[in-house]
Image (cartoon, rainbow, N blue to C red):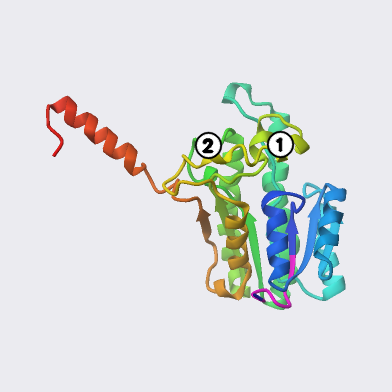
């Protein structure tokens, strides 16, 4: 407990999934949590549930004025900003390259990449002046390997987030400001339903439904949970990670590690059979 005692933290996309759980975890560990998201009803409910040290501000992270307002609130009320978790995200157009609508690409990039850039842009001057801070952004294993998202646009946006983080880390590191990403694997949230066209309310109800399928994706035989990602963000927000900068912390149960052992051994058995070699 108290791993973030006295720290002032901003978390975006806090009305569901990873963002909500991260806000809860940061708060439980002693931080003042400033939460930004579009759905005011859900945001106000979380603010009330957390109580003291929790503040909700309606915010559309694609709008620079809204992102700046989150940072300005932290500085005006508390005089500093120690952590920002650029978590807010959403789906992107699916399908092959020939059918991708450019308008959908622009909307997706605004949410997935521009919001991260804006969070960094407005947090950086505050943190460099105070010579401390941790900037965390949500990446994805889809930004590391092709074929791990239903959307190649989503994959490209997340790859941009991961590399942009490295670039900014090289600039801000000398000011003792750390810049890192967390890259989730298959995590049971409503994002899959949203990607396939469900509205927000319906998509949020699908999280439990996708757990069984996600459990087959990686060597650890279970779906990723929002707690797995929130815990990683908590580590990067805390002083325990004070020598980690420009790093992508992959939390994926091993999906990016390579070919699953069972698939490899099955392929070898098939090869033995083709060669007429008896299995020992």
Q: Residue at x 62, y 53 (%)?
A: 226
Report the side of 181 relative to 262 (left or right): right
Task: Sort mark 1 into few (<14), some (14-19) or many (20+) by Cα contacts within 10 Å.
Answer: some
- Main SS, magenta region, reads loop
Residue, disc 2: 213
Q: Residue at x 78, y 46 (%)?
A: 62
Work out how far the residue at label 1 is from the one at label 2, CA to CA, in angstroms: 16 Å
Up the image or down, 276 lies above or below 51; here it is above
Q: Secondary structure at mark 1?
A: helix
Task: Tell which of 129 and 244 is nearer to you.
Answer: 244
Between disc 1 and disc 2, whose residue precedes?
1
Quadrant into which the N terminus falls: bottom right
Q: How many marks?
A: 2
Quadrant into which the C terminus falls: top left
Task: Reply yes or no: does residue 7 show up in magenta.
Answer: yes
Up the image or down, 28 lies above or below 98; here it is below
Task: Reply yes or no: does residue 97 show up in magenta.
Answer: no
Question: In the rendered structure, which segment of residues is drawn in magenta?
Answer: 2-9
Q: Which mark is residue 203?
A: 1
Q: Residue at x 63, y 41 (%)?
A: 208
Q: Secondary structure at mark 2?
A: helix
Up the image or down, 34 lies above or below 30; here it is above
Task: Tell which of 83 and 33 is nearer to you.
Answer: 33
Up the image or down, 224 lies above or below 26; here it is above
- Residue 172 in the image: state x and y as whole percent: 62, 68
Asked if residue 70 can be seen in this view, the reply is yes
- Residue 149 in the image: state x and y as whole percent: 56, 37
């Amino acid at each position: 407990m108290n791993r973030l005692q006295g720290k002032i933290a901003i978390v975006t996309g806090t009305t569901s999934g990873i963002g909500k759980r991260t806000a809860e975890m940061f708060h439980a560990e002693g931080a003042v949590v400033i939460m930004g998201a579009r759905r005011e009803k859900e945001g106000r409910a979380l603010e009330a549930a957390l109580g003291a040290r929790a503040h909700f501000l309606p915010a559309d992270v694609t709008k620079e004025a809204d992102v700046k307002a989150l940072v300005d609130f932290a500085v005006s009320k508390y005089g500093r900003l120690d952590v920002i978790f650029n978590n807010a995200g959403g789906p992107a157009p699916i399908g092959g390259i020939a059918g991708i609508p450019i308008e959908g690409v622009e909307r997706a990039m605004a949410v997935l990449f521009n919001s991260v850039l804006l969070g960094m842009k407005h947090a950086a001057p505050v943190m460099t002046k105070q010579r401390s801070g941790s900037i965390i952004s949500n990446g994805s294993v889809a930004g590391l390997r092709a074929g791990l998202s239903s959307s190649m646009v989503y994959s490209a946006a997340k790859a941009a987030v991961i590399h942009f983080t490295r670039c900014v880390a090289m600039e801000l590191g000398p000011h003792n400001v750390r810049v890192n990403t967390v890259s989730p694997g298959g995590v049971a949230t409503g994002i899959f339903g949203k990607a396939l066209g469900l509205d927000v309310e319906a998509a949020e109800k699908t999280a439990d439904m996708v757990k069984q399928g996600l459990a087959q994706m990686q060597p650890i035989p279970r779906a990723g949970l929002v707690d797995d990602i929130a815990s990683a963000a908590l580590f990067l927000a805390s002083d325990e990670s004070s020598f980690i900068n420009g790093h992508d912390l992959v939390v994926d149960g091993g999906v990016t590690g390579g070919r699953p052992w069972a698939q490899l051994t099955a392929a070898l058995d098939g090869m033995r059979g083709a060669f007429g070699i008896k299995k020992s």
